[in-house]
Image (spheres, rainbow, N blue to C red):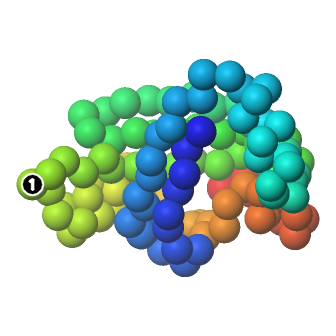
Amino acid sequence: MIYYERSDWETIRESCYRIQPVPDLNHAMNALSERFKELGVVRKKRLLFLVGNTRIHLDEVDGLGSFVEVEAVLFEDDTVEQGTAIVVSFMERLGIRESDLVGESYIDLLTRGKTGDV
C-alpha cells in the first residue's frame, strides 16, 4: 500500500509518501472494506522510466486516457527548489506545459468524469 500526502493544486508540488508492505492482500482488503467506503477502482497500465533520481511514469488509465508524471525523488540534502528545477527541465524536454498539469488523483477524476490525454 502507498499512502500519499500532497495538495490537489495544478502546479508542480511536493509529494510525501509512505510504502507499507501488505503480506496478505485479501486480509488487508477485507479490513479496509469494513472500515472505509470504496470510492471506485483505478485500472491502469504504467511504463516507468528511471533517469537518475527522476521517475517518469507513462500511464494509460481506463476511462480517463493517457497521463505523464515526472517525479524527482529528493535525497536528505536536496531542497524542494532543486527537485522543482529537475521536474521543470524534464517538462520542457517532454513538451509538457504548466497548463497541462492535473491536480487531482485518478480516482477523483474518475468519479467526476474528467479525461486526460495530456
Using residue 17 as the reference point, say whether residue 86 is left or right of it: left
Residue occupying the point 72% across, 35% down: 28
Q: Quadrant of the C terminus?
A: bottom right
Q: Residue lying at the far left in this picture: please name it.
A: 77
Q: Secondary structure at mark 1?
A: loop
Using residue 99 as the reference point, say whether residue 33 is left or right of it: right
Find residue 54 and report its horizontal and vertical position in percent.
Answer: 33, 41
Residue occupying the point 71% across, 45% down: 66
Using residue 79 as the reference point, say whether residue 42 is left or right of it: right
Q: Quadrant of the N terminus?
A: top right
Residue occupying the point 37% across, 30% down: 50
Q: On screen, 26 above or below 58? A: above
How many marks can you see?
A: 1
Q: On screen, 2 above or below 21? A: below
Q: Which residue is mark 1?
A: 77
Identified by mark 1, the residue type is: Asp
Query: Which one is nearer the viewer's eye here, 42 or 81?
Result: 42
| Rendered image quadrant of residue 83 | bottom left
Q: Report whether residue 61 is seen.
A: yes
Find residue 5 and report its horizontal and vertical position in percent.
Answer: 50, 63
